[in-house]
Amino acid sequence: MTAELAENQKLPTLRRFFRKLRRSLRPPATGWVRLFLFELAWLAPVVALCGNFGGWIAWQPDFSADTFKLLAIALIAPALGEELLFRAALLPAPAPERSLPLGAIAFSTLLFAAWHPFQTLVHDGPFAQLMLEPTFLLAVIALGVACARLYWRSGSIWPAVALHWLVVAVFKALFGAPLPW
């Protein structure tokens, strides 16, 4: 009987969690494009500086079939998958009228950055080396902060997914990011 009671007490918590995830998938609030452009305006130079200092960014346009395959896959993983996990699941439900939850954003961003080196357990070669590069991880932290702010202020995960995907797409298609396969 005690185990059944404990299980029943978990249900409201799980329901709230899945309700929060469902709400994160709603369309963004009006004005999200302005928010998106603001985050992109500071993020792009930060990523470019990190890439230049780390030596992992160079003009190498690649419009091969592998690139387009990666861009299609990247919309689901990492963009949607990582944003659902590191923003929608870990951050409080967005409340754009309230100030940013800086502690929660820092926590989710640090977990987001820490996740990237773990990918070397399933990938190797140049992709794995990049995941361990300190300047790349600084760029990942910047992306995490930008996506968290977008999620919080827009009330939806979709602008963060779009930003995450755009960064991956530009990095791969124009700046020679290594493929994970």
Image: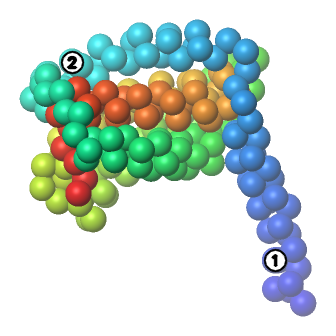
Q: Residue at x 25, y 47 (%)?
A: 66
Please, which residue is most extreme toward the bottom here?
A: 1
- Residue 6: x %, y % from top left: 82, 77
Towards the viewer: 117 or 176: 176
Q: Amino acid at mark 1?
A: Glu
Towards the viewer: 86 or 25: 25
Would you say 125 lies left or right of 114 here? left
Image position of 106 with respect to 41: above or below: below
- Residue 8: x %, y % from top left: 87, 74
Asked whether residue 171 appears in the rendered view, the answer is yes
Asked whether residue 78 appears in the rendered view, the answer is no
Would you say 36 lies left or right of 12 here? left
- Residue 115: x %, y % from top left: 37, 51
Q: Nearer the viewer, mark 2 or mark 1?
A: 2
Going from N to C along the chain, the mark reached first, 2 or 1, is: 1
Please, which residue is most extreme toward the front here?
A: 65
The label shown at residue 67 is none
Would you say 161 lies left or right of 20 here? left
Residue behind mark 1? 7
Q: Residue at x 73, y 21 (%)?
A: 29
Residue 160 falls in which quadrant of the image?
A: top right
Quarter that holds the N terminus: bottom right
Q: Residue at x 81, y 58 (%)?
A: 15
Image position of 144 with respect to 48: above or below: below
Q: Amino acid at mark 2?
A: Leu
Element type at marker 2? helix
Element type at marker 1? helix
Residue behind mark 2? 49
Residue 170 falls in which quadrant of the image?
A: top left
Q: Residue at x 67, y 32 (%)?
A: 156
- Residue 13: x %, y % from top left: 79, 59
